[in-house]
Amino acid sequence: MTRITVTVDGTSYSDEVEPRMLLVHYLREAVGKTGTVIGCDTSNCGACTVHLDGRSVKSCNVLAVQADGHEVTTIEGIAVNGELHPMQKAFHECHALQCGYCTPGMILQAIDVLNENPHPSEEEIRVGLEGNLCRCTGYHNIVKAVQQVAGQDSPVEQPEGATAGVQS
Amino acid sequence: MTAVDDRPEAQSAEIGKARRRKEDQRLITGRTKWTDNIHLTGMLHLAMVRSPLAHATITNIATDGARSASGVMAVFVGADIADIQGLNITAWPVTADQKSPDHLPMVLEHVAHAGEIVAVVVARTAAEARDAAELVDVDYDELPAVLDLKEAATDAVLAHPSLGTNKSAFWQLDSKEGGTGEDVDEAIAKAREDGIVIEREYRQQRLIPAFMEPRSTVVDPTGEQVTMWSSTQVPHILRFCIAATTGLPESKIRVIAPDVGGGFGGKLQTTPEEFVTLAVARKLGRPCKYTETRSETMVSGHHGRDQWQKLTLSAEKDGTVTGLKVELLADLGAYAAIVGGGVPVLGAWMYNSIYKFPAYRFNTTNLYTNKTWVDAYRGAGRPEATFAIERIMDELAAEVGVDPLTIREQNWITHEEFPFTSVAGMTYDSGNYEAATAKAKELFGYDELRAEQQERRDSNDPVQLGIGVSTFTEMCGLAPSRVLGSLNYGAGGWESASIRMLATGTVEVITGTSPHGQGHETAWSQIVADRLGVPFENVEVLHGDTQIAPKGMDTYGSRSLVVGGEALVLAADKVIEKARPIAAHLLEANIDDLEFASGSFSVKGTDKGIKLTDIALATFAGHNLPDGVEPTLDADATFDPVNFSFPHGTHLCAMEVDTETGATKMRKYVCVDDIGVIINPLIVEGQVHGGLVQGIAQALWEGAEYDEQGTLVSGSFVDYTLPTAADTISFITDHTTSPATSNSLGTKGVGEAGTIASTPAVVNAIVDALRPLGINDITMPCTPERVWTAIQSAGSNQSEPTPTEVQPHFEEGSGNQDDPGTATQGAGQ
Ligand code: FES
Ligand code: FES
């Protein structure tokens, strides 16, 4: 067992972990961040994507011990004071999710794509999301959501709440 | 009909509105309840030991090493749970004499496909269970495996030696015998004399549903009812099957489908893993969890498609079709799954599609192999049918030398002809193929793209352009119970709903459907809000728990809205009728003078009125109700449809094909679907997009491949190539609307439309690009390698020529046996 100290969504955790433990298992099982999910065992699907020191990583592809001393942000930590992140709002507005299983990873990857390149072309968005699989949406509305966020300099102005009855 | 049916237009404020989904809030913030997120005190974890061999007899299982490993509570082999493990049954023996080998959740001796569960390790943590599973030592006697579908048909090697044959069943639909059409053999014989006969064989490759959430099951056996949470589309069917086969009374079982991460048919199964987890939890008296790895999903969750399709189409010289004969070989895999042999049968009514064929015969031979079982995958039988007919209609167009849309128009049912009874005996209630096609052509820029195609052909451009057409229909809304009964299906096709009017003004809606991404919570709220005149926000939709929603037939086959939505309407109308006498009493009015509109009863010609929600409160109090009235407004309804619904659409696809490399690129995709009345256009669009990509993926990328030992070599996301955002494009989607007449909302269903229609559109486009080279087929998935190989051998026929010995009804030397390279010049010009 190895002792690690990791900050997850702003809270510091100190734990003994098996050296072989994956970060995704640490997040789900030790920290209780079940918003981050597992979709594969070959690092292909991206469902487990989180931010490590502000850059996206597949948390099934990082050992928990590698996160020692670092900062992890999950889907549960991107809304600030109850205000959804613009990317979360855009996913809701653009109907960029159906079953929602890929969504946490997809949102975190999409944020990373725009952090790298705030005004990407459709092609650049698509290539940027290539490591994240979605079986439900056909990606059409996911791309649209990212474009919507990219098109706005300030955080998107959207009516509050998920069921506020916004019409297109 | 009740008075609510003539409410003013303005009351349909919700239906048709692009409401953002209620479901999203928890999904975008990670506050989800996937089965694998559930953690119960004292819970144990399971790891399965699976057979690496496709066909074998187990001679010994040594479990000592595993039993003594750290944290291991128990190791079970088949014999240890044989008394309570139950059976994974098929609900649809398609014929009375269908052969269905018993599918035990954990095998006792005989392994029929790689991935079958042979032992289970139970430990304190999932990691300990997996570690210990490595220590279980199984000895096998390997048996010869039958893996190829055509070889299976010869019975040379048997998947289940005890059955004596690989044949599960033979099923036929014949228009002459059924009295719905003429004799197909006569039509073909006549066409051989002085018409056109086209004969083709198509391969529907094996696919993997690949929902993103791996399956997971948690069982808590510690209460009076055993509770099972499972990542399933079918909690109600699962409960039924557990009760029917394990000895647990149905009343002792509660099944919950919490948040479920996609299904596409892949989770309409009752699985060995669910039954093994249940058995282990009951044996140990402790809560147990099993969550599969993706590699386990791939090898153990059921697959889809996997058919050989042989078609003979006869036509007059002008292209008017006179007959269609279909012969299928369908691979069921190692066992008949829950729908199982019914999947190819579901295609029987769809090969004739939107066309007026006078004569038709459909035969399917369902076979067992030593591969993963096969069952419904998005479309289930109907994508296969649509692919084959839409491919062969293109071949007919090429033979006649006309545009593929022309040949379709010449043969399709015109919109004046509805309702139309098809040659397969289905009555299509509504449709307008002309309107959908006209709209699609315009959005696509059909004529411009045809002109560009011609230019590229004329200039010998290395990148050729192909245009693919697919004018499809499907039968949705499964299903009228009587029809299911006549087909020997084991259950009904009704759906149920309940509405509870709460005292404080909000409404609980209980549905027997079980959504897993479809947005029922939102769409059902819209329907009920309109019907009862209550705010959308005040409606709460509950589902997926047999304790909360005790009756249901669950979600698959584009049935939820068409069948379940109508149950909602019936329940809402009952609520209104229950409220009516109470309203009359409270308003001191004559019941006949009451009108219900916008959520209120009013007295005609006065300004007196009372809101439905106020009546709910008055009923809750019960202080002042008319004599003899039951003090509740709550209502249950069950709807059994009288007919299927028949969505249709026209899909157009432009593909660029690099003739030097075989690479293909989608240039444009337009679809105009007629799915009847749309409840929520946003949700509909999403269903279409996702469906399109699944169908396109079959055409271009996906395929479950086995090696000669029967090992699934595309057994992970490394090798099973799901499309990514970078592989796909943005689509142009639109609609025409001819309301269904089989339900009061006019809905038809949309879950499968995109998948059914898109596969042939893509392949038709690729073939269209290459037809001048003499190419008339590319086997799916149309990988660059296959396209390139076809181009290299162009003129010499198809990329993978069909061996003649499997084509017994193809007559040597008949007119259509010409080299298609010369016979089909001028297609699509
Ligand atoms: S779980 Fe699939 S990439 Fe991490
Ligand atoms: S929304 Fe279901 S996998 Fe993306």
Image (cartoon, coloured by chain):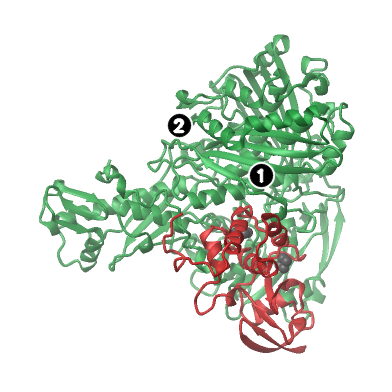
From what the image shows, is residue B222 above or below residue B379? below
Position of residue A27 measured from the top left corner of the image (x, y, whole percent): 66, 78
User: Which kind of residue does numbered mark 1 sit on?
Assistant: Gly
Q: Cβ(mark 2) to ligand 2 < 8 Å?
A: no
Instruction: Report the residue that reaches farthest toward the top.
Output: B194
Q: Looking at the picture, tell me which residue is in the foreground, B812 or B752.
A: B752
Asked if marks 1 and 2 touch (Cβ < 8 Å), the reply is no
Position of residue B116 measured from the top left corner of the image (x, y, whole percent): 75, 58
| Res B429 label | 2
Which class describes the residues within 10 Å of circle 1: few (<14), some (14-19), or many (20+)?
A: many
User: Which kind of residue does numbered mark 2 sit on?
Assistant: Asp
Residue highlighted by disc 1:
B695
Judged from the image, the secondary structure of the residue bearing numbered disc 2 is: loop
- Report the chain shown in green: B
Q: Quadrant of the C terminus of chain B?
A: top right
From what the image shows, is residue B146 above or below residue B465? below
| Res B10 label | none
Instruction: Report the residue that reaches farthest toward the front.
Output: A153
From what the image shows, is residue B82 above or below residue B771? below
Question: Which tint was used for chain A?
Answer: red
